[in-house]
Image: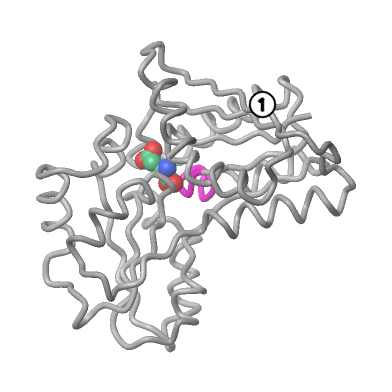
């Protein structure tokens, strides 16, 4: 039985890549909702409905566990998904603020995410929890996921976008950048180029992969085969390039 992964588009592949490193013998099924992307500018209700639809699709395909590999969908739907599917190992992803705070470096922690993630109570709660320990600056990045969906991981246009978003910040006043959207690890080289090499770039992909592994292990659901697993990729868009691009990102 496969582990199901979902995202509003190609971003969740950055989490799937981490899962492949620690669980190469598992089978995977990935669903990218590129037709309905971006989620980050939709209402909570719209995101919730889309996420439920995808989870149903993955379960119909036989998924034994679900990774909501999208910060935006996690904040809009994960609590409710847990109520509706109490027996399915289900893991979401949220901005990896804790490891950034634990680095204990001087300077701001910049948290790049979609406008929706930044607005949610879940995020406000995280900010509040660490407010005495660190200066966390949310940076809503409307339009950034589209670069990844269009296969642009570097280049002048992306650099100009990032320079504008990160204006005023550099290694003298910034300790780390938390990537609070699963699309952003694919543009992390350009982010580094703009902010400088001394700033740590942190994302929650590996932590999330470890969490689903732990949850499956607990239920005795890990695959004990010694052969490399299979990956199936689906996308809601009928543009073929999304499937091609998905494979490119898996194999990066
Ligand atoms: N990849 C998604 C996330 O982690 C969001 C991108 C979007 O659809 O706006 O938040």
Give the residue at x 21% y 44%.
154
Dominant secondary structure (helix, strand or loop) of the stretch shown in magenta: helix
> In this view, which residue lies farthest toward the right?
220
Q: Give the residue at mark 1.
A: 58
The relative height of residue 213 versus residue 197 in the rendered view (above or below) is above
Give the residue at x 66% y 33%.
4
Mark 1: few, some, or many residues within 10 Å (few <14, many ≥20)?
A: many
The C terminus is located in which quarter? top left
Callout 1: helix, strand or loop? Answer: helix
**In the image, residue 117 lies at what x, y percent?**
41, 53
The relative height of residue 57 versus residue 239 in the rendered view (above or below) is below
Marks counted in the figure total 1
Give the residue at x 46% y 70%.
97
**In the image, residue 39 lies at what x, y percent?**
39, 37
User: Over which residues does the magenta segment extend?
Assistant: 70-76
Q: Which quarter is ligand 1 in?
A: top left
């Amino acid at each position: 039985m496969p582990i199901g992964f979902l995202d509003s588009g190609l971003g969740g592949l950055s989490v799937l890549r981490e899962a492949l490193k620690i669980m190469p013998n598992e089978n995977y099924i990935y669903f990218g909702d590129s037709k309905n992307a971006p989620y980050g500018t939709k209402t909570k209700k719209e995101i919730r409905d889309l996420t439920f639809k995808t989870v149903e699709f993955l379960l119909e395909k036989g998924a034994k566990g679900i990774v909501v590999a999208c910060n935006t969908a996690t904040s809009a739907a994960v609590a409710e998904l847990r109520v509706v599917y109490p027996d399915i190992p289900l893991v979401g992803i949220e901005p990896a603020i804790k490891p950034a705070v634990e680095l204990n470096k001087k300077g701001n922690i910049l948290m790049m995410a979609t406008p929706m993630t930044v607005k949610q109570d879940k995020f406000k709660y995280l900010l509040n929890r660490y407010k005495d320990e660190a200066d966390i600056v949310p940076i809503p990045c409307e339009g950034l996921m589209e670069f990844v969906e269009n296969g642009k991981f570097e280049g002048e246009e992306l650099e100009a976008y990032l320079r504008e978003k990160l204006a005023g910040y550099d290694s003298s006043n910034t300790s780390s950048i938390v990537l609070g959207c699963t699309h952003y690890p694919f543009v992390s080289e350009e982010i580094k180029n703009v902010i400088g090499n001394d700033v740590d770039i942190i994302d929650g992909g590996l932590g999330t992969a470890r969490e689903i592994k732990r949850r499956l292990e607990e239920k005795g659901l890990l695959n004990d085969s010694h052969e490399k697993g299979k990956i199936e990729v689906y996308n809601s868009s009928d543009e073929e390039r999304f499937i091609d691009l998905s494979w490119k990102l898996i194999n990066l």
